[in-house]
Image (tube, rainbow, N blue to C red):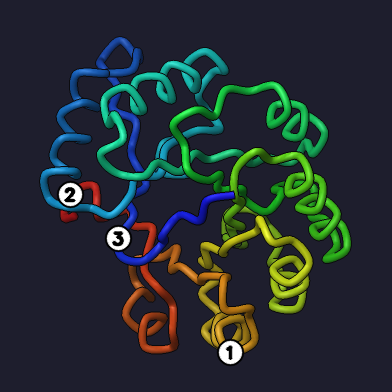
Amino acid sequence: MAQIDLKGMGVALVTPFKADKSIDFDALGVLIEYLIGNECDYIVVLGTTAETPTLSKDERQQVKDYVRKRVAGRVPLIVGHGGNNTMELVNELKTGDFEGFSAILSVVPYYNKPSQEGIYQHYKAIAEASPLPVILYNVPGRTGVNMSADTTLRLAYEFENIIGVKEASGNITQMDDIIKNKPARFDVISGDDGVTFPLLTLGAVGVISVIGNAFP
């Protein structure tokens, strides 16, 4: 399985809308060209910033199709694939079209508030089903549950196709623990623009940025 280079700035792509609430693909195309022209290292499609939980299934597919066609291999693409229904996610991994994407970004299950063992089992199922490398995404301020350093490291060591974590817990001590104890092939990425520089000094390799949509 090919390893995507997560170093540098990835941008979590927004989803532009028209006044009639339909997706503005012209604006999306302009944004993609702006990001590539300003040398962002990779683009993340259908993440939190894209308002993915409120997009319909058809809209999500349209965005995936448009972005990969527009980018046309010029920069790596990561696609968001997360939620709180483990089996639905697994089924989509087995049957979905992931051509043109280099990895999936999968958020900790939200609302259900799983235990640490529950989080582990969720990601175990995803890792075993995924045709692409998996990036964990810990953002307890949105999901309602924190994935501990121990759980992150357990997943990192047990599944070779789990290649990194987007860390947005805000807990510098936890992030430092992960960075100091992770396997060499596993990357830590800042998931919060505000803590990117402190994380880089600890050994993180980059950021998946929101403000990068405006300032790549």
Percent coordinates x, y for residue 211 in the rendering? 26, 55
Q: CA distance from mark 1 to mark 3?
A: 22 Å
Tell me which label, 1 or 2, sits earlier in the chain. 1
Q: Quadrant of the C terminus?
A: bottom left
Residue at (40% x, 44% y) in the render: 44
In what element is the residue under mark 2? Answer: loop
Residue at (86% x, 54% y) in the render: 121
Compared with 18, 205 (above or below) is below
Tell me which label, 1 or 3, sits earlier in the chain. 3
Residue 180: numbered disc = 1
Q: Amino acid at mark 3?
A: Met
Residue wearing tag 2? 214
Mark 2 vs mark 3: give the one in front. Answer: 3
Q: CA distance from mark 2 to mark 3?
A: 13 Å
Residue wearing tag 3? 9
Q: CA distance from mark 1 to mark 2?
A: 32 Å
Q: Nearer the viewer, residue 103 or 59?
A: 103
Image quadrant in which you'd find residue 204 = bottom left
Q: Is residue 78 left or right of residue 19?
A: right
Compared with 13, 124 (above or below) is below
